[in-house]
Image: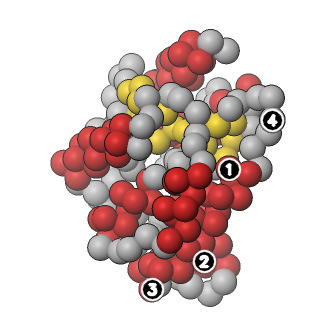
Amino acid sequence: MRIIIDGTVGCGKTSVILGESQRDSEHKRFLGLADLGYPVFTDLVINVIKHMRNSGINDPSQNWDIFFKIAVQHCINNYNNANVGTINFYDRGIYYLEIMAKRYGCTMPSEYDDFCSRFHYDNPVFIFEPIKSLDMTHPHSTDNKQKVYTWEDRVRQHHEIVKLYEKKGYETVIVPLKSDDPYRSNDYRVRFIKERLGI
């Protein structure tokens, strides 16, 4: 199975998947889905930015066309590299690229539409509610420099993500917060996903 965990920026996906957050200065560890032995494919956007920086392109805004082309290929590779006979968790699916392209006024490469017409992840798609206590008005060092979001931006994007997955024919499950402390919600969200999948 290929299960997507998605959501707007600052919603706690990575903490639930890996058991830690790049934004946590204290580097606290929590139980993540990876700790339970499930294959995980880490944050699509961060991995593509890292790839571009290693190739001498400091920020995606220098060449969005290259960013989206690399990102689509990255998604295709991750999809094809899923382990058979178990649940694979994806920190964002390919569809989030469409949300990004709209935000930055870009056009998706033809490979995106080709992928969407030929391949399908499994249901349900888990969409995390944004965490208000996380400040996303300043980009992290691993982010693109345009990743600046107000709370209102994040709420708006959350609804855009839900609508996009539903438009693509997916069953969406909203993963709520137990508290506005992102780390106190982590164990609850892991249990929520496990119970929903019956694992």
Name the mark nearer the viewer: 1 or 3.
1
Quarter of the image holding residue 162?
top left
Q: Pick out the residue farthest to the right.
A: 84
Q: Nearer the viewer, residue 20 or 82?
A: 82
- Classify mark 1: helix, strand or loop: helix
Earlier in the chain: of badge 2 and badge 3, it is 2
**Residue corresponding to mark 4:** 84
Q: How crowded is mark 4: few (under 14 residues within 10 Å), some or many (20 or more)?
A: few
Earlier in the chain: of badge 1 and badge 3, it is 3
- Classify mark 2: helix, strand or loop: helix
- Classify mark 3: helix, strand or loop: helix
Labels 1 and 2 touching (C-beta < 8 A)? no
Kindly identify the residue that appears in the image at 38 percent across and 27 percent down: 174
Instruction: Determine which of the numbered discs, if any, sits on residue 79 in the image.
Output: 1
Rounded to the nearest angstrom, the CA distance separating label 1 from label 3 is 27 Å
Kindly identify the residue that appears in the image at 55 percent across and 68 percent down: 111
**Residue corresponding to mark 2:** 52
Q: Nearer the viewer, residue 188 or 8?
A: 8
Earlier in the chain: of badge 4 and badge 2, it is 2
> Is residue 8 positioned above or below 67 on the image?
above
Rounded to the nearest angstrom, the CA distance separating label 2 from label 3 is 10 Å
Question: Horizontal and vertical percent for residue 120?
Answer: 57, 43
Instruction: Determine which of the numbered discs, if any, sits on residue 62 in the image.
Output: 3
Rounded to the nearest angstrom, the CA distance separating label 1 from label 2 is 20 Å
Question: Horizontal and vertical percent for residue 63?
Answer: 47, 84
